Image (cartoon, helix red, strand yellow):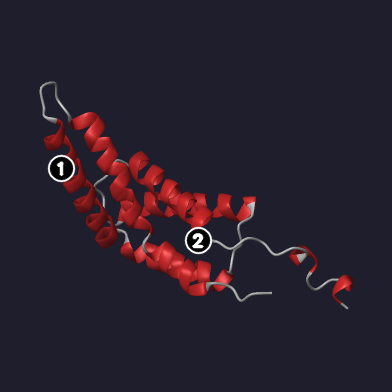
Amino acid sequence: MSPYPRWRVFLSFLLCPVLAGPFIGVWLALSGSQPGDEAWVVLVGSMAGALLAALNALVFYGVPALLLALLYSVVKPTKTGLSVLLITLLGALTALFWNMFVFPGLKDWASALLGGGTSLFMALWALPKQSPNSHLKGTMSDT
């Protein structure tokens, strides 16, 4: 059995807020363009907005991302449906409460949606697969 990839999980969830940047960049490109705008202006503007949003998200949501990354690297979740669901919900709720009480700025629903969405993507990418028969660990079949 290979060791748990703690650093990969920790760094992935620590940088999770950065994923909000591309989502916001696409939103800017789709909603910010006006009839008659040149395509390159919309593209450059949305790319700059995505970069600024990613850096902003890392600054404002870095503390809760650090705390969740530490939690996940200690708890060692694997890529199961329940783990992915819990991580998605925890990411959404953490972003929502952080936005409501610490750094209000985004709409609450947008913060929760981005927190849950980025946590879902990171959970699917960074978590290791569950090893076969790991559900039997510590049972009679181990002896």
Inter-mark Cα distance, 2 to 1: 30 Å
Q: Which residue is mark 1?
A: 44
Identify the residue shown where x is 45% and y is 64%: 68
Question: Which is closer to the viewer, label 2 or label 1?
Answer: 1
Residue 142 versus residue 105: which sits nearer the camera?
142
Task: Give the percent coordinates (x, y) of residue 43.
Answer: 18, 38
Residue 70 versus residue 135: which sits nearer the camera?
135
State which quarter of the image contains the C terminus. bottom right
Q: Residues within 10 Å of mark 1 (few under 14, many from 20)?
A: few
Residue 126 marker: 2
Task: Give the percent coordinates (x, y) of residue 74.
Answer: 54, 73
Compared to 89, does 39 lie above or below? above
Q: In the rendered image, which quarter is residue 59 located in?
A: bottom left
Q: Residues within 10 Å of mark 2 (few under 14, many from 20)?
A: some
Identify the residue shown where x is 14% and y is 41%: 45
Compared to 7, does 89 lie above or below? above
Amino acid identity at mark 1: Val
Disc with the residue nearer the chain's start (2 vs 1): 1
Instruction: Count every numbered label the image shows and give the total.
Output: 2
- Residue extending farthest to the top is 35
Horizontal arrangement in the rendering, residue 45 relative to residue 22 (left or right) = left
Amino acid identity at mark 2: Ala
Identify the residue shown where x is 26% and y is 54%: 54
Residue 96 marker: none
Q: Considering the numbered disc 1 on the image, is that residue within a helix, a strand or a loop?
A: helix
Q: Considering the numbered disc 2 on the image, is that residue within a helix, a strand or a loop?
A: helix
Task: Give the percent coordinates (x, y) of residue 141.
Answer: 88, 71
State which quarter of the image contains the N terminus. bottom right
